Amino acid sequence: MAAVLEGPKPEETAAAAEDAASPTVEAVGSRPGVPILLAGNQLNLDLRPGGCRRLQYLCSQQHTQLLQVEFLRLSTHEDPRLLDDTLAKVPWSLLRLRSLVLKGGQSRGALGACLHGTLTTLPASMRDLACLAHLDLSFNRLETLPTCVLELRSLDALLLSHNRLSELPEALGALPTLTFLTVTHNRLERLPPTLGSLSTLQRLDLSENLLDTIPSEIGDLSSLRELNLASNRLQHLPASLAGLRSLRLLVLHSNLLSSVPPGLAHLPLITRLDLRDNQLRDLPAELLDAPFVRLQGNPLGEASPAPPSPPDISQVPEMPRLFLTSDLDSFLVTPHGCSVTLACGVRLQFPAGATTTPITIHYRLWLPEPGLVSLGPHDFLLSGVLELQPHGVAFQQDVSLWLLFVPPRVRVRRCREVVVRTRSDNIWNDLETHLEEEAPKRRWARCQVPHFSWFLVVLRPVSNTCLLPPEGALLCSSGHPGVKVTFPPGVTEEPRQVSMQVVHMAGLELRALLEESEAAVSPLLCLSQSGPPSFLQPVTVQLPLPPGVTGFSLDRSHLHLLYRTPLTTTWDDITTQVALEFTHLYARFQVTHFSWYWLWYTTKTCVGGLARKAWERLRLHRVNLIALQRRRDPEQVLLQCLPRSKVDATLSRLLDRYRGPEPSETVEMFEGEKFFAAFERGIDVDADRPDCVDGRICFVFYSHLKNMKEVYITTALDREAQDVRGQVSFYRGSLPMEVPEEAEAARRRKGTDALWMATLPIKLPRLQGAQGSGQGTDFSLMPLNLGDAETGFLTQSNLLSVASRLGSDWPTVALHLGMPYRKLQRIRHEFRDDLDGQIRHMLFSWAESQTGQPGAVGHLVQALEQSDRQDVAEEVRAILELGRHKYQDSIRRTGLAPEDSTLPSTSASQNPESAQA
């Protein structure tokens, strides 16, 4: 039922009945003459900016309808003085207020991090809210609990999560009717003993704090049913916990517990006791055998080491700080701890006592590979892959990890967040991540490392998760308030983890895609869960109706509920298979298993194909494929993936060095998608490549990396007699068993879901004697003594390989090598029609001047890195490493060194050419 303020027109009343609570409809006008709508007894002013001014205007008019308001939501992302002045007016205008939500966190930063509100205290007049039973102050900047809260005698639920509270006041125990208290994600170091006076308290959540002890008075909470103390620093528990006779759920995971009170096994109503990831070595037999106990991550049964003697603080040295150079891939961690900065920019901090014995940590950076990285359909990769060894090592204290990542350059839709993802047992999991910024282009993702494995940074849709108990639960989306999932009691036998992700699609984008002015869609909902695929009871899903559609104007023949399983590419219309219930703003339906769900409003009769187009449009990045042959050496083929907007510019830059084939039709792929390039019809790929199998190369596109591969194709035919014509074909997913004879047949079959994407021609011209090698004749391949025994040696053939990779970046490399700008201009003039000649002349003239000079190779690698050609620098390092191994093997084979000896680096200078053979 809608109460009307400021007298809206009659035709507006029905359409506004529930729009006051909708994120798409303005709830309160901000100036005279604008209709102000109130939905029932709820006033929601947190979904649009300017809520404080609207509430002040409403209070200044002294509307009698304000007496009906029992539920008020107000965003705290406002000016602090304006917010304080507005809250001071609330007790005088909203006399029947029962629920007050002053919550931050609804706005997000550029990288998806929740922004805390500006609320630091409450005005003293708030004590006059005599009917207030529910108060939510989450995601703010409270350092102490406002005194007025302790005088709200009717308060039933108090939410203080994600603030800066370091302690709770003693007077908190005087709240006579409090049944629910959550102070998770704060800085609590102690609890007041008066907490045990809350005789009516039923649910208490103190997780994610800094608690190391719990007062024994907590055993006096006679009505307590759920207690969550996870992710603290608890080493002992009071025996009084065994006196909580009403307790059903006790969560103690991720602490430092070495033992628990034996009386916990005799709690009469306990259904779940979570003791995972502690230091428990021995437990009473009743708890070891109990089905409701979770014990993973504990060293049960292991011998307990002697407790270390407390260190003499006066003699403990300052924590060492290590800065690793690029030639180091390991470092030593001692019990004193250390702070480490790797050459790649990664930082680690090992606190004192993190390890009881010295341990050597190794690290390595990997490029993303199909078998290593798995991205979701709407994920965006922001970093390379960091590997820390030894894998699975357990530390006594939390180890902090800072990963440097590249912020996305494209416009990122709202409701996304940056997370660190780690791999364990071939499964990638997301860690709780905090964002830090040193400079506009230096962003850090900080997390607590549970173990050593692989780590990377990902931008993903915001994920809301909860642990679903058999008693049921309610899961809501933090980014879309109208998206909810209700789990009834008995939905599962064992607790399971459920998660929700929501992706939004702009209406203008959809209407342009479908060429239909009335088309609209709800947010796209992804639901997933651990455990069995189905639930024991139907689960109720609530989705907002598409924008512009209300329960009054709904034409059910135009509304479609679509469903998609993760392993398929098609969307199924299940509108007739479920019972859809509608309110003015929402649609509700019941399901028994989870996947993707989507509400569509369109006049089209067949929606599956349209939904697939919209789904692909929602993917963050699309890419086109390029296949080009080098002009001077047609056997060298460049394969490159580029964002669609950069294809034309890249082609114009490369065509002076490369020639066809050019992509004759659009070949689209998406972020993190795997495809194969297969060389067929008389030609093949050089089989020495590690990623080549039967002439087929597997490739994955990641948008911010240099996605370029240069491969050599070969042929068994006699090229001295005739030209060789072949083709390179691109496939999505697995390869077909047989290749069609004609490319035209493949093009006819090519579609959105086809495995075959495109076929482009390749031509190898007839060889003309020795000049068909394509390596050029202006330089001989005589030995070149470039380098020294310390950094390694490069031959002329190695430099030719480097020269073939530089392209138009060669002037930048030359300047970093110390070459005068006047000489660069002279080289450009002398080889003005030959880019390859410019590159080779620059590189070899520099190499000749460096012959016999120490550190020459290291100088080249450094210049490549400073020129943003990390790919070529890594190739040079690989050449040097391969040469060192070959040289050492050759010395051992000739018997000049024993098998177990380490060759002195100076011996390499005696025959540098043999090291690079």
Image (spheres, helix red, strand yellow):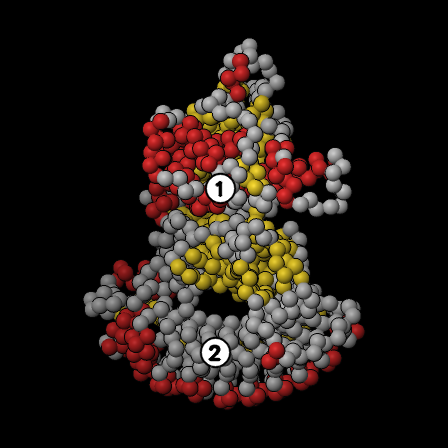
Q: Quadrant of residue 109?
A: bottom left
> Is disc 2 placed on a helix, strand or loop?
loop
**Front-most of 653 and 556?**
653
**Residue at position x 57%, y 50% in the image:** 327
**Front-most of 439 and 383?**
439
Nearer the camera: disc 2 or disc 1? 1
- At label 1, counting other C-alpha atoms closer than 10 Å, the crowd grade (few under 14, some 14-19, many 20 or more) is many
Is 49 situated left or right of 320 in this image?
Answer: left
Residue 478: tell me if it is visible.
yes
**Front-most of 72 and 207?**
207
Q: In the figure, 881 relative to 832: above or below?
A: below
Query: Which amino acid type is shown beneath numbered disc 1?
Result: Leu
**Residue at position x 51%, y 13% in the image:** 768
Position of residue 110 measured from the top left corner of the image (x, y, whole percent) = 39, 57
Which callout, 2 or 1, points at the residue further toward the start of the chain? 2
Q: Quadrant of residue 646?
A: top left
Is 410 situated left or right of 239 in this image?
Answer: left
Specify the quadrant that holds the C terminus: top right
- Gap between marks 2 and 1, in whole Å? 54 Å
Q: Quadrant of residue 55?
A: bottom left
Residue 39: tell me if it is visible.
no
Which residue carries the number 1 mark? 860
Which residue carries the number 2 mark? 165
Residue at the far top in the pictured view: 721
